[in-house]
Image (cartoon, rainbow, N blue to C red):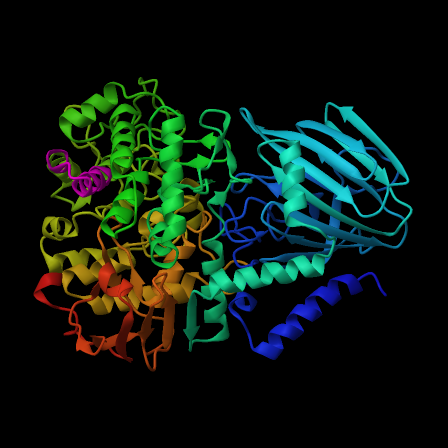
Amino acid sequence: MSRTASCAVLISVLLAASCQRGKEPVDYVNPYMGNISHLLVPTFPTVQLPGSMLRIYPERSDYTSELLNGLPLVVTNHREKSAFKLSVKQGDSCQPVYPVSYDNEHLTPYSWDVSIADGSVDVSFAPSHQSAIYKLSGNEPLTLVIASLCGDISADGNLIKGRQKVSGETTVYLCLESAQEPKTLRTVKTEEGSYAILGYAESTVNLRYGVSFIGEDQAEANLRRELSHYSVEKLAAAGRREWNRVLSRIKVKGGSEDDKTVFYTSWYRCFERPVCLSEDGRYWSAWDNAVHSDEGTPFYTDDWLWDTYRATHPLRIITDPATEEAILASFIRMADQGNGWMPTFPEISGDTRRMNSNHTVATFADAAVKGLHLDLDAALQSAYKCLTEKTLAPWSDAPAGALDRFFWENGYYPALPQGEAESDPTVDSFERRQSVAVTLGTAYDCWCLSRLASAAGKDSLAQEYLEKSRRYATLFNPETGFFHPKDKDGNFIPDIDYNFPPGLGARDYYDENNAWIYRWDVQHDIPGLVAMQGGPEAFCVALDSMFATPLGRSKFEFFSRLPDHSGNIGQFSMANEPSLHIPYLYNYAGAPWKTQKRIRQMLRTWFRNDLMGVPGDEDGGGMSAFVVFSSLGLYPVTPGLAEYSIGSPLFEEASIQLPNGKRFTVKAPGASADAKYIQSAALNGEALDRPFLSHSQLMAGGELRLQMGTRPNFSWGRSDESE
């Protein structure tokens, strides 16, 4: 059998089986979609089971990289490099990791096959939840290197154990064994790392291993519990079944093959994070550096809430509320084990407190109004403490200080005049104050806290924070129609270029996006925003002008300051999460046909089945959930409100399997690239005249039927409630 045969066997067996059954959801997943970035971070072709602790991706900068930095064993936090490395020893040199050429790579959500070292070794991989299998086949006897780059490795015959520091006190542990007994074995400890060198008499070596965040013995227990064999093919087949089970919760008909690929690839990315850390009923917590019993509720972490509260969490509420409840319970545990503050960017190694605002409260507010089972009092307490005791300064976990007191007293975060040096120690020198972004984001957080307080029966607190949520208006400049930074004396900062605000990433006053994007960052009071812009007609004109206004300078100049602001149509950026709800805003101003046009424009232009098919940082489901929802024809514009805005479904039929055993189906006969406009709508046979659907209507199951056409129907959806 040739060297490539081992790869071909696995692929041909699985593909042959799928052809006999017809194409299944997992067959549409293209993990390479977006692997070359437009400017910043690409997507990574992650191989894992849905939400599983063990995940890997080929370690390279992006798809264009010439070399792999060894073979990965486990990626810990999102976007990080692998902890531990597996290498095939090359030449006479002795080193912990051997960068290696690669070719003929085939990757699915559940398997990875690749030829390395100029085709001299074939590699196959498949994962379980906390364990995995590698098979390596070469022309001659293999010598392998297992490395920890910040820890220790020990070896005893065919059994390797090790540990590697991740960050702080968080450590990942490894237990690896080979089916073949090594002929030679030695361990090396240098400044570069600790590693074991295993020389085999065979040209094919089978490896299986387990990982843990609790200890080496637990890593071995995870291995023994999950794997009793060394068969990559068997494990890949099990992984394929698991992915199909999960992805089949949503089934689509119609559309092109590329449409289905973009849809299911986006759906697959929604399961990359958070990951389940429970190991035999226990889990490691970086919040108090201790091991805890999970008491029957799995513990999840690694979730960037600034990105995922918008659509990823709402999507999970519909399709898997039990897991969402466990995730939210994990956030409460983090607060209890730490300083009482709700996490904002929880990772395996702790909370990194990135970006601005404290949007975890939005996930609780959304879950509460949609009927999930939560510890409302505990959630409210930790969200309140985080909002009021932690500084609002971006990327900081410092206690609240002078700038925060100013915010609560005056209703806005004060900006520095252009060119003035920062004097407050809580403000990061790179991230700056982001005064408009912080003010608007915190106003929304106040509204979410109000919703959560109301659900918990705390009416006085709910009213207090509802009033605070309206303070976004303090930064509205009526002369320009934009949200504009103010100094500590209440004066608008002069000479702000809304297209090109000062600071890298516009961070002096906004964040990663320019003022056009933050013009619409009032998810919680859209009627107020419409009125502020002069009413529905003026609101739509302002939206139109964003899509029609050019960058105003060369792309080189624009993106050198605003690299996150890619995926442009005019001044609109499809590449960053604060933009996701904007195309749906026409629905709130009596022009839903414009939402329908824009949604299809975004899906067709910026999300494609190719290596550059994602317009910006995908953030582990943060952006992909927009594609899933929008392809179905719905979007949760305001997490914390049990309502979905109707767009333009991409498929003629899409069916969601609900956890209560019912199905909700969106039927759009004749939907196509041209037929994107809704002519009429009916919910379970009754006429629907509003471009909105309630959560209770969706979860009751049934059918939303949309009659599509190639030209706008200017009358549909213009009910009094949407004006």
| Residue 138 x %, y % | 85, 54
* Most common SS among magenta residues: helix
Q: Quadrant of residue 457?
A: top left
At 45% across and 65% down in the image, what residue appears? 263
Q: Is residue 430 magenta?
A: no
| Residue 692 x %, y % | 20, 64
Q: Nearer the viewer, residue 513 or 629?
A: 629
Is residue 346 placed above or below 265 in the rendered structure? above
Q: Nearer the viewer, residue 236 or 142?
A: 236
Q: Nearer the viewer, residue 494 or 530?
A: 530
At 17% across and 59% down in the image, what residue appears? 588
Q: Is residue 445 magenta?
A: yes
Q: Quadrant of the N terminus?
A: bottom right
Q: Quadrant of the C terminus?
A: bottom left
Q: Nearer the viewer, residue 112 or 366?
A: 366
Is residue 662 placed above or below 559 in the rendered structure? below
Q: Is residue 544 visible?
A: no
Q: Quadrant of residue 224?
A: top right
At 43% across and 36% down in the image, what residue appears? 346
| Residue 314 x %, y % | 33, 53
Judge left or right: residue 115 versus residue 151. right
Magenta segment boundaries in residue numbering: 443-462
At 36% across and 48% down in the image, what residue appears? 577
| Residue 87 x %, y % | 76, 42
Toward the front, the furthest residue is 295
Judge left or right: residue 604 versus residue 470. right
Q: Is residue 139 visible?
A: yes
